[in-house]
Every structure is written in structure tokens, then in C-alpha cells.
Image (spheres, grey):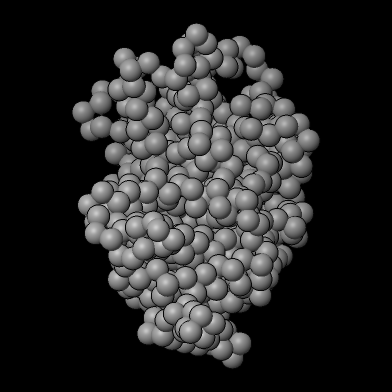
Amino acid sequence: MNLYTASSGLGKMEQLAVGDSPLHRLPPMVKLITTLVYIVAVISFPINNVSGLTPYIFYPACLMPVSGTPAKPFFARMLVALPFALLGGVSNLFILRDTAFMLGGLAVTDGLISFVSIMLKMLLTVSAVLLLAATTPFTHICRALSQLRLPGVICLQLLLTYRYIAVLIGEMITAVTAYRLRSPLRRGIHIRHIGSFLGVLLLRSMERADRVYQAMLCRGFDGTWDWVRGRRAGAASLAYAAIIIALCVLLRFFDLSEALGNLFVG
Amino acid sequence: MLQVNDLTVKYDEKDASPVLDSLSFTIGDGEKVALIGANGAGKSTLMLSLVGVLTPTGGGIVLKHDDETAPEHTHTNSPKKHVHDTVRVDRDHHDRKTIGQLRSHIGMLFQNPDDQIFMPLVKDDIAFGPANYKEDPAATERRMDEILARLGISGLKDRLSTKLSDGEKRLVGLAGVLIMNPFILMLDEPFTFLDRRAQRTLAEILKGLNHTLLLATHDFHLAQNICGRTILLHKGKVAADGPSKEILDDEDLLRRCGL
């Protein structure tokens, strides 16, 4: 992924977040809590329990079409987390070599099960976070975090950091383009220039941050911000939250895959 | 009325030559003044000093507003409780309360709108200032709609700030300042990054505002079109102060001041 696609990718997620769908219209607090409950439920599964995790696919499978989230950019963003999950999962293939069971003459090891479990957990948790980001503007997520009593200064730092990822990418694009135009025969930035390049980027970012802070001061900012605003959850939102939380808890203690398997196979 | 009395600003106390050197001038209520000067003459520094971002090394600023017809400020917790305030800012009077009062009276539009707009959504960014003064969200929303309509950008309210053109960003930045209902509006090179059409649109909007205006610009034609008076800065000092036509037509004076 180059800087241009990173920049446009960020913009695409923001564009999705200001869309209009039943999921977009839910209060951010409701979406944040259900996402957190879902993630906690998924990661609380033991590493060797794949069948228990599988029914949790209901969450992205149902909410993606409801929210109108397009599959291509959604899965493209998921690929970012893939190397980390692969790194954790692949090592288990070599460490946990005991055979768990035989499948058509092939030995399925504990390592393979844990690998599949890690990949599935990555798929489910990252898709939950992406769904939240694709249906809720980041300002509203920060506001919901503040309502959950996260200190205002941390919420503000989160918001500013997020906002200025785009600005930093913009500064980098300008600097990289200027470098490339003056060194057309090189591919990338020469190792000799990396230090000064990063130094200049840091100075430019600091100057930019200073100007942004001055602009905020001019509009009455004094280091604190009144975050606690937002819509109250209506009956429909509460019903949504109750259903999602109930399903997450139910599936955590009741293995639906195993029950269905027993029902059909015996 | 804004009085600047012997204002001196140094970035470092040890500097031999100040960035602003004993500046004095007065701007009356409703007056539109252009601030011109070569790069490094001190235009941006003067503006940052007038909003209390930079502390004066010497001299100071007095801000008075006695207009009986001016609307009462709507911020419930604003330091600007009424329109007859007198705010004095100098080296010894640069505390948080005084600066808060000053900033509620003077709005500033920065040169680069990306420095000013930092909320992802346009409506959230415009509401940032009133939220800092704990204004009622419903009142903010009403005023936001009025201001957006006045600037002709009602359609941008729910848009992403990162997806706006430079001209749109400039107007959104202006809306974020106007919603603070300032007595004095300061604009630091507002025509930069804009094409001719967007420049004309912005110039028309600025001409139509009733605010006291201080406009730093390199565009002499627009300066003359909008402002009846011009202050020319040179090396941190006032080199000339008078009718715009007189100063901007004086080529010798402009050349001497590096323009």
C-alpha cells in the first residue's frame, strides 16, 4: 500500500461513516458497547475452540448488508491485520504438533486448530471494528468513549491523532513527490537521505501542529472540551443492543455448531 | 474600537531586533482595514498578538466596544457577557481570563484552512468554538444554519471536511469564525489557494459583513476593493497608514518597503 492509497483509503472509510442506514442511525454509544461486548466474547474463547467461534460470523454477515458497507474496501482493510495474525498463528503450527484428531486419514494437529482459531478471531474482531468505523464518524466514537468516562483529554488526543494521520500522510506525499522529482533515477529514498528526510518531516509536522493549536486557541479552546453530548438511545436502539449482547453471551456458553452437528450427524 | 499602543513583540527576549517594533494604530468599529507588507514584515505576528497567542514584550492592546445596536452575545458561559467590555492586554495583563475575553471578541481566519479545520465533519468543526464556550447545541445549530445560508454553503453542513475544495474549506473556516459572533474579524491572507472565481466570491462576502475587518493580503486589487484604509508594515513598523488608494498607488513607497 503506497501513500496515495493510504490517503484515499482513509477518506473512503470517513465517507462510509457519514452514510445513511439503520446501523448508521443508531446512537454511537450503542454501537460502541455492542462492538466491545462482541470483541470480548470472541477473544475469550479458548485457542482450541473453532466450532464455538464459527457462529459469531452472524455479526459481520448480517450487519454488512444492513449498513450497505461494500465488501471490497472492507476486506482490503482487513488485509492490513492479516500479517500480524499469520505471524502469531504460523508459529503455533510448529510448536503444537500433537495430533488432535484424524480427518480422512490426515492428522489435524493442535497447532493447525489454534492457527485456524487465531485467523478466525482476527477476521471477526477486525470486521467488528471496521463495521463500527464504517458506520460511525470518529468524532462520535470519541464522544461515546467520553460518555463511558474515558478522560476527555484522552478522547481529544485520539481525535486529533486520527485527524492528523491524514495531514501527516499529506505532508509525506508532498515531501516524497518533491524528492522523486529531483531524483528520477532512484527508486525510493536513498538510505543516506532517510535521516534528513524524516527530520524535515518531523519539523514540518511540529510546525503544522503548532499552527493547528493556535487556531484552536483562537476559537476558545482551553485544553478541555465538553464531550458529553449525544442522542439518547431509543427503544429500537436498546432492543438492538439487547439482541446483540444476548446473542454474544448465549453463543459464548452454548456451542451452536456442535449442537447442529449432533442434530444432523447424530 | 481596537487600539494598539506601542506594541512590541520579540520571539526571544534576547533578540536585538523585535518582530514588531512599537506599533501604534487604532481601528474604529465597522472599519475595514487592509494590512500589507513584504514577507516577514510582521503581518501574521501582529495578528497572533492581537488574539493573545503571542505575548507582547512591550506596549499593549485595548479593545472597546460601545455599539448599542450590537447583538447580545449568545454564549451562555462566554466571557463576553455584554457588548460594552473593555479588554486590556499587555505584558502584565495576559492571564487566562483576559485572553479568553479577547478571543471571544476577535475571530481569526488562518492562512491555511487545513490548519483551522480539524474535525472530520463540517458541522462538528463549525460547532467547535461555541462548544468551547458551552453554548446550547440547539442555539449553535440555528446560528450555524443562518451562517451557512449567508455564505451560500448550506449544502456542505454534513460533508467531510477532508473532501472539500480549497474554496469550500476557506468558507467553512470563515463560518467557524463567524459563529463565534466576533466584533473584529482578522483574516490572514484569505485569498491564498483560491482561484479567481472563489476569490471574487469571498471578496463579495467580506464586503457584505458588518464586522470590523483586518485583512492581511498580498492582493492589492482585492485589498482596495474591500478596504477603505490600508496599513503598510515594513520590518515590524508601520511604514504608512491611510486611504487604500493613496498607499497602494504609491509605487515608490511600496518599492521602498520591499513590495
Which x, y percent locates residue A229? 49, 76
Which x, y percent locates residue A101? 33, 65
Which residue is found at the position 48% from the left and 24% from the top? A176
Front residue of B69 and B51? B51
Q: Is residue A240 visible?
A: yes
Q: How many marks?
A: 0
B215 lies left or right of B60: right
Front residue of B45 and A126? A126
Residue B235, above or below A78: above
A150 lies left or right of B104: left
Which x, y percent locates residue A224? 36, 64
Which residue is found at the position 46% from the left and 31% from the top? A172
Q: Is residue B60 visible?
A: no
B130 lies left or right of B193: left
Which residue is found at the position 64% from the left and 32% from the top? B193
Q: Residue furthest front?
A: A105
Q: In which quadrant of the rendered image does the C terminus of chain B lie?
A: top right
Which x, y percent locates residue A135? 58, 65
